[in-house]
Image: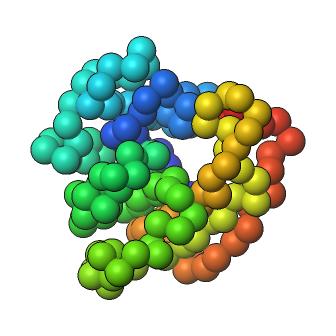
Amino acid sequence: MPYLNSTIHDPCCGDGAIAAVLREHGLHVVATDLVDRGYGDGQEDFLRVGRRGPLVIGNPPFNLAAKFIATAVPGARLVAFLLKEGFWHAASRIALHERFPPRQELILTWRLDWTGQKRPTMNTTWWVWGDVPAGRWLLPKPEEDVYA
């Protein structure tokens, strides 16, 4: 993907779980969050400030995910958000889906261990918008669990 030489903004970087992996692969990442969790390039309110580059990749807070989509997608070259698998299973999100239909659905075939307690409970999917081929794919678990 030639556009990955552009700046990637992780607007909800938390402890850096996503941004750090992107940086380890040589990508230029601006990592911000509303709350300082010990990682990143500063605190800022993404919903007020907006994108810091043409690419946005992150895991927004579930209760704000719809607002993150509405803020990130217009004018972006690529947006990828990791959300609950059933994110679109709500009548209140029909208009959002009609306005910003994702191009790709990348379904994780394993559950992420968000708490580190070895009892993951949530199914998650990467939803992708932008100039990418449309489709739906099942992602196998990486041999090295980069999400642990």
Residue 115: horizontal and vertical position, in percent?
62, 31
* Residue farthest along the top direction in this orientation: 38
Q: On the image, which quarter does residue 125 sit in? A: bottom right
Image quadrant in which the C terminus is located: top right
* Residue farthest along the left direction in this orientation: 48
Residue 63 is left or right of residue 106, and the answer is left
Q: Residue at x 37, y 38 (%)?
A: 12
Pick the residue in front: 18 or 34. Answer: 34
147 over 37 or under it: above or below: below
Pick the residue in front: 138 or 93. Answer: 93
* Residue farthest along the right direction in this orientation: 143
Q: Residue at x 67, y 49 (%)?
A: 121
Q: On the image, which quarter does residue 75 sit in? A: bottom left
Pick the residue in front: 92 or 12. Answer: 92
Q: Residue at x 74, y 68 (%)?
A: 138
Do we see residue 84 in this rendering? yes
